[in-house]
DNA sequence: GTCTATATAGTGATAGAC
DNA sequence: GTCTATCACTATATAGAC
């Protein structure tokens, strides 16, 4: 089994000041979870990436469960903020485009959604982590559901049936596509999902 | 992190004769992979479930990569055979129902698709395993695509756009829903996907 | 706050008796 | 074909120096 962990360079946090050790650990932890799952990396892997010793990680995150929990919180907070930052004035189909853009740029082709990954690893995560993942999923589903309702109203999207159910189906589809895009080393699968829902074939 | 592996009872193989040790190992391996991912169980876990020693597993599957490969082959063969066994005379919407039935009963609420799980664990599996997973995905997508084309022709399904693209989107949606059904301890999400595509609200 | 050093347990894998 | 015994390594986690 392939146990090598590729070295990474770019931190996720965008800040003017040098990020704290804690933040650097949290950034790389998110990357490793999205890349390899919660059982696919060790404190040693993470320490090597950050350039500290494993005991320093234990200082900030006493147990791996703590690390997972904080990683989910950070990822969820950041992603939901990006969701809220999508311009409310945009027509519904373009909102979906922004959502997919977000998903594509967040993963560099090697990473999938952190919450999707940990949902696959559900049997390995503690209850409190599972609850946070549930909250993340529901927030995304609700946002997508309301955008679909909008899209039906403004005539930019094909939406069949109840928008809430359609929102759940769309989220599942995007999560699944994220995994499959990585498997086939492409991102067209992700873009095709929204493409197929659009009423207008081309936007300008 | 939760590292306990629940003990299982029912073997997957259905045969009159007592299944061989090799088959029992392979059955339980598939279960553990679907439950916890390829990094979430050890030879010791598997040996304890089967009731043998780890060295016996190494006898049949020298390395864990070998075990993963054989597990994917067995799962893929069995699942694709079940796909082919779906009555070709059925209307398209009922074929989709059979597909979802298959997905639901195969997982007991704790397991997800083996290939979906290993696609999430992509960074941990060798090339040959990744290729088998790709083949499994493409076979499923092709089958779903042709059922969707049928469904448009026989008027039982709402299909928007290219059936091939729609087949890929549907497979992704079902894979994602499998993960999310387990997260929320339900299976309605999985059934709602196909339910929303149906032209007739109820089929007698 | 970061380190060295270490404890304890688990990992995949192999040699060789029966 | 299955076992006991063991290897070299890695895992998470802790104690205590600096």
Image (cartoon, coloured by chain):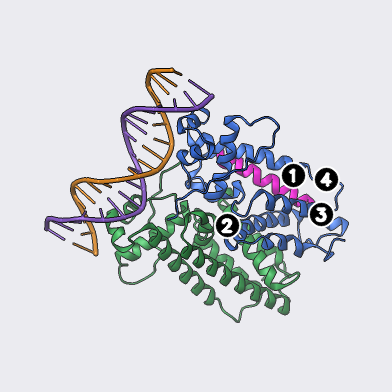
Chain colours: A blue, B green, C purple, D orange
Location of the N terminus of chain A (image quadrant): bottom left
Residue A76 visible in image = yes
The reply to whether dot 2 and dot 3 touch (C-beta < 8 Å) is no
Q: For the stretch drawn in magenta, what is the main secondary structure?
A: helix
Question: Which of the chains bears the disc numbered 3?
Answer: A
Mark sitting on residue B178: 2
Mark 2: which secondary structure? helix
Mark 3: which secondary structure? helix
The reply to whether dot 1 and dot 4 touch (C-beta < 8 Å) is no
How far apart are labels 3 and 4 at the CA level?
10 Å
Q: Nearer the viewer, mark 2 or mark 1?
A: 1
Q: Are marks 2 and 3 on the same chain?
A: no
Residue on which disc 4 sits: A87
Q: Residues within 10 Å of mark 2 (few under 14, many from 20)?
A: many
Point out the tag, 3 or 1, that comes first from the N-terminus. Answer: 1
Q: Residues within 10 Å of mark 3 (few under 14, many from 20)?
A: many
The reply to whether dot 3 and dot 4 touch (C-beta < 8 Å) is no
Image side of residue A130 versus residue A80, left or right:
left
The reply to whether dot 3 and dot 1 touch (C-beta < 8 Å) is no
Res. B70 image quadrant: bottom left
Answer above or below: position of B100 versus B3.
Answer: below
């Amino acid at each position: 089994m392939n146990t090598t962990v590729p070295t990474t360079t770019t931190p996720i946090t965008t800040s003017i000041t040098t990020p704290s050790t804690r933040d650097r650990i949290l950034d790389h932890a998110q990357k490793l979870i999205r890349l390899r799952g919660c059982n696919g990396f060790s404190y040693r892997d993470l320490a090597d990436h950050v350039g500290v010793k494993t005991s320093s990680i234990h200082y900030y995150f006493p147990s791996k469960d703590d690390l997972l929990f904080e990683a989910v919180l950070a990822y969820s907070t950041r992603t939901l903020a990006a969701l809220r930052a999508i311009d409310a004035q945009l027509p519904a189909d373009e909102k979906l485009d922004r959502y997919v853009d977000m998903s594509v740029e967040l993963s560099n082709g090697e990473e999938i959604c952190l919450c999707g990954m940990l949902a696959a690893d559900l049997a390995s995560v503690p209850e409190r982590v599972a609850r946070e993942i549930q909250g993340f999923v529901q927030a995304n589903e609700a946002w997508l559901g309301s955008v679909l309702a909008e899209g039906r109203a403004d005539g930019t999207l094909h939406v069949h049936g109840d928008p809430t159910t359609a929102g759940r189906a769309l989220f599942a589809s995007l999560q699944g596509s994220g995994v499959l895009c990585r498997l086939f080393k492409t991102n067209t699968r992700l873009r095709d999902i929204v493409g197929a829902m659009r009423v207008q074939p081309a936007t300008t």
